[in-house]
Amino acid sequence: MSLAPLLNAAPAIPFHALAAMSAFVLGVVQFAAPKGTLPHRTIGWIWVCLMMSVAASSFWIHQIRLIGPWSPIHLLSIFTLLVVPLGIWRAHRHEIADHRRIMILTFAGALVIAGLFTLLPGRIMHTVVFGP
């Protein structure tokens, strides 16, 4: 395992990867920690900022080009930019079941599933984790 391929990539890529990995770790903490507490809300806001950063930074990453400079993963970024604020709004309105569902699905889709795709051969994170 070597971070060199990640650190030698265009600046948006290590920023995106670090934000995603941080959001993943904080997401796991959120699942395990008590809900509705000040720490939950504080970590939640940090997680939201990280997720918005992950989604926004993806628009400067064009390693896979299927439609001009874009790929289907950019649709997930747009979706994330829309549903994360919706999840916040649902929490604000005390619609906790909806808030929980939105945040869990965002975590699963935008971090876990998308993260697994970064481990495919030929991707930078595959090289980081498994070597050249």
Image (cartoon, rainbow, N blue to C red):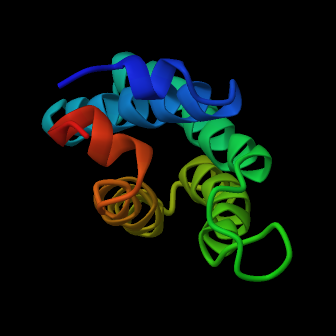
- In the shown orientation, is residue 2 left or right of residue 13? left
Q: What x and y, as percent, mark residue 13?
A: 60, 34
Q: What x and y, as percent, mark residue 53?
A: 67, 35
- In which quadrant of the rendered image does the C terminus lie? top left
Q: Is residue 41 visible?
A: no
Q: Residue at x 69, y 31 (%)?
A: 12
| Quarter location, residue 63 | bottom right
Q: Residue at x 58, y 29 (%)?
A: 9
- In the shown orientation, is residue 21 left or right of residue 88? left
Q: Residue at x 71, y 71 (%)?
A: 65
Q: What x and y, as percent, mark residue 91?
A: 54, 51
- In which quadrant of the rendered image does the N terminus lie? top left
Say if 99 sits above or below 45 in the image: below
| Quarter location, residue 115 | bottom left
- Residue placed most toward the observer, 24 or 13: 13
Q: What x and y, as percent, mark residue 68?
A: 86, 76
Q: Is residue 119 visible?
A: yes
Q: Residue furthest front?
A: 132
Q: Residue furthest bottom?
A: 67
- In the shown orientation, is residue 129 left or right of residue 74? left
Say if 89 sits above or below 27 in the image: below
- Residue placed most toward the observer, 46 or 56: 56
Q: Residue at x 34, y 60 (%)?
A: 104
